[in-house]
Image (cartoon, rainbow, N blue to C red):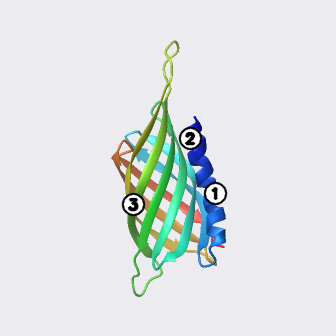
Amino acid sequence: MSKNLLLIGLFLLLPVAAAAAPTVAMDFGPRAGLSVSPDQFVAGGQLSFSGLAPDWTFDPSLELGFGDDLTVIALNFDALYHLRLSGTEWRPYVGGGLGIAFVSWDAPPGVHDHNDSDVGLNLVLGFSVPAASRHHWFTELRLGVGDLPDLKVVGGFNFGR
């Protein structure tokens, strides 16, 4: 339990670190989608730090997955490279990062529930589309390597500051 609190505390300190660096911009917003193996509805939020390097962002996210007799809390720490396409404002991106999943199995009555922590890598392919101001929509395909969900299709909206 103390490891979980430490990880969540570090995740919450990221905006403070971004505010300390004057060239770093931070966007934030909700995300939702579906995962396969386990088959779940996934919802959560993310931060997106840009300005660290040209065309790169660091996008940590927190997701809650429900379904398939499991509850999953996932922390993702992704580095994404945004491609520039001439003639369009759409920005495809590729990347990946560390994923940590806290899994709770819902056991039948009379049997103890089981909890576990898993670590793996995420491979990410997606695109973002600008909206008003600095806001943007995004959608992505996430492949899990290791003990993470095999596949996720997630979309969301980021509010720019």
Q: Residue at x 55, y 40 (%)?
A: 3
* Label 3 – label 2 distance at C-alpha: 22 Å
> Residue 4's mark?
2
Q: Which residue is mark 3?
A: 96
Instruction: Give percent across and percent down for residue 12.
Output: 63, 54
| Label located before the other in sequence (3 or 1) | 1
Q: Residue at x 52, y 15 (%)?
A: 109
Q: Is residue 43 visible?
A: yes
Q: Residue at x 50, y 18 (%)?
A: 112
89 w.r.t. 104: above or below: below
The quarter of the picture where the N terminus appears is top right
Q: Please, what secondary structure does the residue beneath circle 1 have?
A: helix
Instruction: Give percent across and percent down for residue 138.
Output: 50, 66
| Residue 147 location, quadrant | top left
Residue type at tag 3 = Gly
Residue type at tag 2 = Asn
The quarter of the picture where the C terminus appears is bottom right
* Label 1 – label 2 distance at C-alpha: 14 Å
* Label 3 – label 1 distance at C-alpha: 21 Å
**Disc 2 crowd, CA 10 A, few/some/many (<14, 14-19, 20+):** few
- Closer to the observer: label 3 or label 2? 2
| Label located before the other in sequence (1 or 2) | 2
Please give left or right for residue 161 compared with residue 48 in the image.
Answer: right
Instruction: Give percent across and percent down for residue 87.
Output: 42, 87
Q: Are marks 1 and 2 in contact (CB under 8 Å)?
A: no
**Disc 3 crowd, CA 10 A, few/some/many (<14, 14-19, 20+):** many
12 w.r.t. 87: above or below: above
> Residue 13's mark?
1
Residue type at tag 1 = Leu
Camera-nearest residue between 27 and 10? 10
| Label located before the other in sequence (3 or 2) | 2
Instruction: Give percent across and percent down for residue 50.
Output: 54, 73
